[in-house]
């Protein structure tokens, strides 16, 4: 904590600069008839520096507000589409004052068309346009640094962009897709000095015919407009770096854009832990594909048969060596045909070390105590090759017809070796080895046709082929799962192995017909289907000391399952706009059938079901809304939970499916509030949601010591989930203030050792920050976050707290020097005082670039305080985990960058 306080004091002192007293000028913008004008632009140009010192946008009452330096002379410019612009010289007085403006209708089109291009923020319908130069001061290096300074825009630790609380689903540059399906590659690689304007496209829909017919409020895209000098020319940079202990980095980036085609090339080689692409990125990478039946009332997704390979915490590990290459292109052969695609390859060699404590649930214990406690020390070596490729085509010969086709290939080759020392009632040493080479091909074909203004058709189809072959090996000193696996006990160790193969083919298709009787209503009829076929094979065997194989032929240790799922549905929805309200109720009728063939017999389950959904939007103002959603959905599981034979989950966990599973029923209700006020630069969003799960899929587990044997059942008890998240952000002159909260409560019912076991979790996180945004003075951001995780398993409680104050600082000085620093302090502790750790991280960089030079030189230090580990905690239905995770040491790097 002392380090944090010292860093905060230094940052505040460094950012403190002498400035003239500021006064507020406010007033009303009207037309000649006295009618107030909403969204008029009002800006103040400092006549001495020619900088934009202040700007404002009039609200619904025509009011504007500027913060100006007293005694300074400005040029005030007021503009509004269709009216003559106003320009006048104005000297700010010594006290707050009021000043109104009356605008005249434009005499000709030239006057009417003029929009004040210098305006930092403009709103055009559903599009917000930010002028990046108005929010930056030259210390920014990449797009991420620019976005963090924009009101209403956030970039999380994973590089994902959020606007008004909604995740950005697409990033474009000059209207062309930039690695569709992932925003991280854009935020981490697009140079900040190439960015001119940032367009936030709210209510985004790529199909113009469907605009306004569907509910797109949660769809947000970004379009980056480049500066003129970056168009029709190659731009980018090449960075190389070297440090002590044979540390290195090479990071070339090249970009080219013109109206007909674009090329983006990103490469990265380093061993300092800067991961451009992680396993989490790979598995979450959608490629722009979406769920066709998102509001149809059915949830059926194909599970990943990954082996649970270890993932990094905050991109930190004990050692990381990575190589990355990616290329993205777009090409327009004709005015009506667009092609685009990308190739991504990532390799990483990672060393992880962790110490963890697991406390297992014990539903039979009446004294609110946990059952068995396990302390485990793990050392993991991981080798990963990841590859993705996508090709997209859009053909639009007219405004009435559009045909899209997409194909996404994902493949990987992953190996992991882990040594585990497990200490509980018995000490055991385990060597776990995992390998897998999964492959998936996802194809998407869509046809959109507008017959006339009242009749619109949409045909969408998506096919997934997936082949997974995970292999698992565990070598243990102690006999695993006595009574289940008939091992040869005469061997020196227990060398257990499992082969598994899962092949999936899933087709989703639907036809939507929209009848549009008028501009404020439409009827939507949907006919669709989901057809899935899966094959699941697994086999457990033991390798003996002489390298021979002992196969287990028991039915319960082998799987050979054929599984099919069918859903045919018909939906109806009615959408109508009445005043400020939009109503969109509807229902979907389904006929389901699932069949599993195994053990020489067939089990089928058929169901007819009608599920409703309701959407209501109250548009209070242009940029303020309240949305309500309610839906009932049926959830179905795939072949993994139907396969009766045992499979290893890990060294102390086995799983057996249940071929008699039925569907689960989910009730979900949510309320969402959003407000974006350009008058006082306030951004507010809040969301609360509640779900009740009936007949939910739950694990029925038997726990012996630390060993678990689980199966899936349809629970007779309902599960409840309640979540809230909200954020408030406001800009006061040069200060950006933000605060937020995330709360989640869950109550789950499980079966442990044939007894009902109730687990509850209540997680809370709160954060607040204040950041300056001076043009010529140093800038600082001070923040604090607090989290509380309260886990209760069958009356046994674990409560952990984390305090995290932080400081970010940047300064440009001496005509070419830039200094940045990022400090985070953590205090992780448990309520019972068994854990109490403090640790902090400090990264700093000093760079120099001579004005008008292409060369930049810098010295960068990561983990300057040489912190060795961090803490985390997690919760499951069966146990609570607290762990210590070891990370990379201090690195000092000398970097040279050449800007093209």
Image: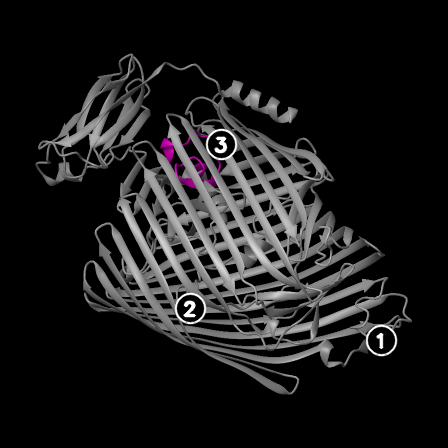
Measured as percent of width and height from the top left, residue 35 is found at 13, 34
> In 3D space, how far apart are the residues under numbered discs 3 and 1 (Cα atoms)?
63 Å
Of residue 737 and residue 232, the one placed in the foreground of this image is 737
> Which image quarter holds the N terminus?
top right
Dot 2, crowdedness within 10 Å: few (<14), some or many (≥20)? many
Q: Which residues are magenta?
A: 132-153
Disc on the earlier residue, 3 or 1: 1
Which residue bears the numbered disc 1?
Answer: 548
Q: Give above or below for 96 relative to 662.
A: above
Mark 2 / mark 1, whichever is N-terminal? 2
Position of residue 661 measured from the top left corner of the image (x, y, whole percent): 57, 74
Q: Give the percent coordinates (x, y) of residue 49.
A: 33, 20
Calculate the distance from the C-alpha at mark 3 to the C-alpha at mark 2.
43 Å
Q: Is residue 729 above or below residue 15?
A: below
The vertical placement of 87 against 883, above or below, is: above
Q: Position of residue 219 (x, y in %)?
A: 38, 53
The mark closer to the camera, 3 or 2, is 3
Marker disc for residue 444: 2
* Mark 2 vs mark 1, CA separation in Å: 47 Å
Marks 3/2 in contact by CB < 8 Å: the verdict is: no
Query: Which residue corresponds to the image point at 28% horizontal and 48% vertical from the top-left?
Result: 619
Q: Residue furthest bottom?
A: 600
Q: Nearer the viewer, mark 3 or mark 1?
A: 3
Classify 317 as above or below 407. above
């Amino acid at each position: 904590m002392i380090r944090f306080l010292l860093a905060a004091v230094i940052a505040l002192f460094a950012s403190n600069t002498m400035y003239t007293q500021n006064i507020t000028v406010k007033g009303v913008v009207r037309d000649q008839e006295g009618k107030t004008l909403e969204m008029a632009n009002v800006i103040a140009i400092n006549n001495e520096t020619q900088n934009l010192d202040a700007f404002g946008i009039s609200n619904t009452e025509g009011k504007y507000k500027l913060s100006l330096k007293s005694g300074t002379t400005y040029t005030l410019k007021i503009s509004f589409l269709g009216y003559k612009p106003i320009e006048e010289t104005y000297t700010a007085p010594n006290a707050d004052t009021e000043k109104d403006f009356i605008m005249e209708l434009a005499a000709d089109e030239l006057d009417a068309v003029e929009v004040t291009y210098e305006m930092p923020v403009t709103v055009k319908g559903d599009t917000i346009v930010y002028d990046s130069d108005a929010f930056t001061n030259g210390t920014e290096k990449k797009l991420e640094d620019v976005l963090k300074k924009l009101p209403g825009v956030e970039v999380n630790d994973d590089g994902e962009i959020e606007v008004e609380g909604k995740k950005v689903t697409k990033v474009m540059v000059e209207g062309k897709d930039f690695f569709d399906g992932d925003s991280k590659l854009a935020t981490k690689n697009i140079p900040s000095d190439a960015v001119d304007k940032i367009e936030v496209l709210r209510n985004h829909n790529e199909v113009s015919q469907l605009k306004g017919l569907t509910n797109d409020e949660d769809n947000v895209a970004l379009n980056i407009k480049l500066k003129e000098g970056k168009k029709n020319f190659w731009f980018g940079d090449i960075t190389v770096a070297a440090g002590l202990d044979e540390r290195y980095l090479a990071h070339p980036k090249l970009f080219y854009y013109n109206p007909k085609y674009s090329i983006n090339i990103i490469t990265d080689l380093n061993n300092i832990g800067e991961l451009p692409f992680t396993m989490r990125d790979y598995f979450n990478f959608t490629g722009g594909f979406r769920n066709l039946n998102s509001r149809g009332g059915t949830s059926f997704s194909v599970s990943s048969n990954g082996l649970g390979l270890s993932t990094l915490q905050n991109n930190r590990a004990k050692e990381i060596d990575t190589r990355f290459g990616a290329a993205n292109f777009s090409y327009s052969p004709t005015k009506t045909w667009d092609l685009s695609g990308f190739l991504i390859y990532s390799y990483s060699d990672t060393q992880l070390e962790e110490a963890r404590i697991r406390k297992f649930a014990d539903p039979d214990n009446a004294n609110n105590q946990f059952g068995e406690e396990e302390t485990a020390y793990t050392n993991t070596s991981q080798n990963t090759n990841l590859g993705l490729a996508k090709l997209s085509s859009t053909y639009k010969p007219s405004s009435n017809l559009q045909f899209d086709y997409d194909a996404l290939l994902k493949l990987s080759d992953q190996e992991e070796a882990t040594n585990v020392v497990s200490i509980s009632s018995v000490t055991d040493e385990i060597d776990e080895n995992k390998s897998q080479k999964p492959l998936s091909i996802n194809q998407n074909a869509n046809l959109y046709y507008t017959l006339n203004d009242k009749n619109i058709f949409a045909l969408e189809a998506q096919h997934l082929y997936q082949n997974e072959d995970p292999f698992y090996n565990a070598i243990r000193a102690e006999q695993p799962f006595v009574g289940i696996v008939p091992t040869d006990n005469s061997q020196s160790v227990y060398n257990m192995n499992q082969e598994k193969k899962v092949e999936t083919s899933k087709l989703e298709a639907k036809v939507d017909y929209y009848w549009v009787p008028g501009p404020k209503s439409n009827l939507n009829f949907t006919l669709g289907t989901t057809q899935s076929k899966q094959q699941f094979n697994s086999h457990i065997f033991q390798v003996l000391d002489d390298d021979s194989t002992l196969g287990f032929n028991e039915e319960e240790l082998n799987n050979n399952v054929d599984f099919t799922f069918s859903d045919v549905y018909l939906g109806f929805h009615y959408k109508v706009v009445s005043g400020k309200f939009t109503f969109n109720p509807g229902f979907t009728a389904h006929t389901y059938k699932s069949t599993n063939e195994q053990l020489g017999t067939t089990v089928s389950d058929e169901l007819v079901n009608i599920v409703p959904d309701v959407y209501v939007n109250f548009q209070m103002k242009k940029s303020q809304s309240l949305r309500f959603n309610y839906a009932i959905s049926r959830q179905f599981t795939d072949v993994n939970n139907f396969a009766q034979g045992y499979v290893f989950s890990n060294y102390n966990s086995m799983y057996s499916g249940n071929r008699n599973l039925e569907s689960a029923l989910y009730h979900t209700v949510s309320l969402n509030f959003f407000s974006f006020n350009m008058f006082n630069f306030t951004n507010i969003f809040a969301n609360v949601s509640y779900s009740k799960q009936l007949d939910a899929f739950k694990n029925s587990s038997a726990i012996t010591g630390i060993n678990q044997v689980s199966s899936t059942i349809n629970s007779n008890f309902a599960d409840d989930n309640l979540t809230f998240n909200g954020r408030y952000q406001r800009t006061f002159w040069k200060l950006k203030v933000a605060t937020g909260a995330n709360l989640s409560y869950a109550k789950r019912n499980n079966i442990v050792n044939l007894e009902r076991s109730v687990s509850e979790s209540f997680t809370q996180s709160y954060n607040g920050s204040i950041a300056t945004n001076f043009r010529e003075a140093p800038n600082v951001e001070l923040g604090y976050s607090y989290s509380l995780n309260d886990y209760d398993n069958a009356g046994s409680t674990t409560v952990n707290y984390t305090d995290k104050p932080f400081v970010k600082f940047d300064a440009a000085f001496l005509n070419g020097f830039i200094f940045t620093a990022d400090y985070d302090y953590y205090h992780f502790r448990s309520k019972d005082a068994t854990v109490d750790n403090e640790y902090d991280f400090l990264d700093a960089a000093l760079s120099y670039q001579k004005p008008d030079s292409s060369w930049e030189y810098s010295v960068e230090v990561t983990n300057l305080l040489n912190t060795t580990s961090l803490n985390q905690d997690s919760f499951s239905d069966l146990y609570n985990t607290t762990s210590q995770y070891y990370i990379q040491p201090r690195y000092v790097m000398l970097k040279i960058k050449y800007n093209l």
